[in-house]
Amino acid sequence: MTGALLVGSITVASAQHANKSDWEVPFRTQDVTAAKLDQADVAKINKFDSNKYYQLVVNEKTGAEAEGAEVKVLVQDRDYTTGKLYLKVVALSEAEENGAKLTSSLWKIDVQPDASNGVNFKFVNKETGYPLTFDHENAVDGGTLTSESVKAGATKTLVDGCIDRWTWYNVAKLTKGTFGAQKLWAFVHDTKVAVALAQNDNGEVVAVKYSDADAGVNMADQNVIALTPVVAGAKVLSADDINSMIDADGSWEYGNSVAGDNWNKAMFDMFHSGKTAEVALADAYSYFVREKGYVAEEHTLLENGASTAYAGFNIVLNVKKVSTSEPDSVLMVSTEAYEADKLNPEKSPNLKLVNAPAPANYANLTAYNARSIFKFTYFPTQDSLVIEPLNASSMSVAEYQANTAWTATTLANATIDQFYNSVNEGKARGTGALTAADNTGVKKAAQEPVAITIAYLSDGSVVPTVGRARTYAGDEFANAGLTVQDKANGKAYVTNKQADMLIRIGFDHDYSYLARASKVDGTYFVRLSTTKAASQGEKRVDGSYIVSDFAGHMYYDVKENEQDFNHMPATQWVVKQLGCDNRTAPQDNETPRVKITNREFDNIAFEVSFTM
């Protein structure tokens, strides 16, 4: 009987919201580029941390070949007409319209012991949440590749299958040196082939295969793609980048509306260094993190009508308002300090962070409103932020002890050259009177950042504050080789010095993924799940069945009282899993694609990957 063949139902959800063609999922954009702004070579690593995100440089150039060569990275890319995933080799350059997007270029790398090679590697993409996976049955004969690993005329290979752990390096940590370019491959024992990566003329990745004899030791005899793990370049963020919290869930609706209950607000997590692990900052002091959230807004600073060396210092964090009737307020470095009578504010001021009334006019830059202007530098590998105020100048010990008002000091009328606090101009804070040359602010070394950090108070509590790095020794920062960015080019300098600020600040952001699922072989009903009301006379309602007819059409139908779909094969669908399995591959395919065929009209068939 037909009824005995049925093992369940497949539920098909209808789209409830529009989806922009280049977004990963509804409610999440993919607009933040992966371009590096720090004017430095890619930073290689000497060990793998499974909690960090790395970029994978493709066929890294060294020596003379590296001069002027475009750095390219491996990204995972979704075809939104089919939902299928592919890999692509993309340039990091921000100038290119099709340059790499940040989240799709980031990979978590899991290392496991391997009896035959020491270790093996699994790569999970941040944007899609799916590992770098191929089916050896879809791999094409590699043949002779160009020096750039190009197989001309090849078709891109679907990300799918059983191979999700790869041979790469034979160790996960180096005592000397860093990991360089190394070819990625996997050996399929049953078929005696090695599977590796190549690219076609469009930079789309093609899975290629070679016999064990042709592959050579560790694929040495073939020009397949070699990957180099690197720390993703730091990036100075725009207001849109901040409001989207790096293309996180909900970013489809970001903007600059400060009032209202729409999504667009940035929330932050803040941790300080504990004795053995990170500790979340106490809620009692974390209004900066949790009170309402913020909407970033840009205010460009100009010097004689041209961009200044302070480029990047253009972010104001407006406190998110529930209604337009609320007064405007912004995050600001207060002129008040924690326990100023017990500490030395000139050395480590422990200035308070407050939500203060918004200045009336940012076009007229003053020493006061500069205390609410920040530069945000994002470090993708650590998923963390360095937040630097434009002005964090502090009164002297004597002035604090005398309860002197900040407005009564020379700091209140200081110019930008006098209070400027960060690395762009590379100036040291002197010990003399307040002058432009002295760059008075927080006492610091040249090129040493002043940023949000923490202070330990006398009662043992830990509070967010603004100060200099805690690891400065002698002229370490001044002689660290950090070049100061030319004022003329108008770009922000990325603060990327090794400096322990005793804190990690991150966006409170989530990334929902289209998680793959599958169905075991069998016969199923396919039913619709929707919250939308049907039009008059339409059978497209929640729980309706997808059925086929002899003309090759699929349509929705509702079971009438006199009908028994268990005896109607046109309402039934046969599911057959596709691709490799544990009989022929190094690993099992936990979520294989399936072919779905109508049980009565077998010309009606399609291949899918289930997502949830």
Image: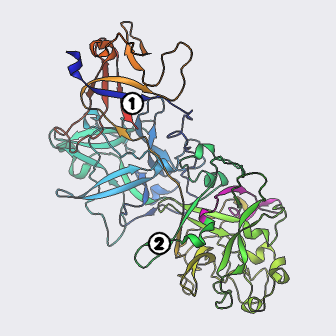
Q: Circle 2 sits in a helix, a strand or a loop, which is it? A: strand
**In which quadrant is the C terminus drawn?**
top left
Q: Residue at x 37, y 63 (%)?
A: 49
Which mark is nearer the camera, 2 or 1?
2
Residue 276, above or below 46: below
**In which quadrant is the N terminus drawn?**
top left
In the image, what residue type sits under mark 2? Answer: Val
Q: Residue at x 45, y 77 (%)?
A: 274
Viewer-closest of 278 and 122: 278
Q: Given the current orientation, which residue lies at the most extreme top position?
A: 551
Residue 192, above or below 246: above
557 horizontally vs 474: left or right: left
Q: Circle 1 sits in a helix, a strand or a loop, which is it? A: loop
| x then y, percent, for residue 482 | 58, 72
* Numbered tag placed on residue 279 in the rendering: 2
Range shown magenta: 289-313
- How far is mark 2 from mark 1, CA to CA? 53 Å
Q: Residue 111 occupies which quadrant of the picture?
A: bottom left
Question: Does the magenta segment cover residue 541?
Answer: no
| x then y, percent, for residue 597 | 31, 19
- Circle 1: is it few (<14), some (14-19), or many (20+) Cα within 10 Å? few
Label 1: which residue?
Answer: 153
For the residues bearing labels 2 and 1, Cβ distance under 8 angstroms:
no
Q: Residue at x 50, y 40 (%)?
A: 25
| x then y, percent, for residue 474 | 56, 87
Q: Report if residue 96 is visible in the image.
A: no
Viewer-closest of 132 and 332: 332
In the image, what residue type sits under mark 1? Answer: Gly
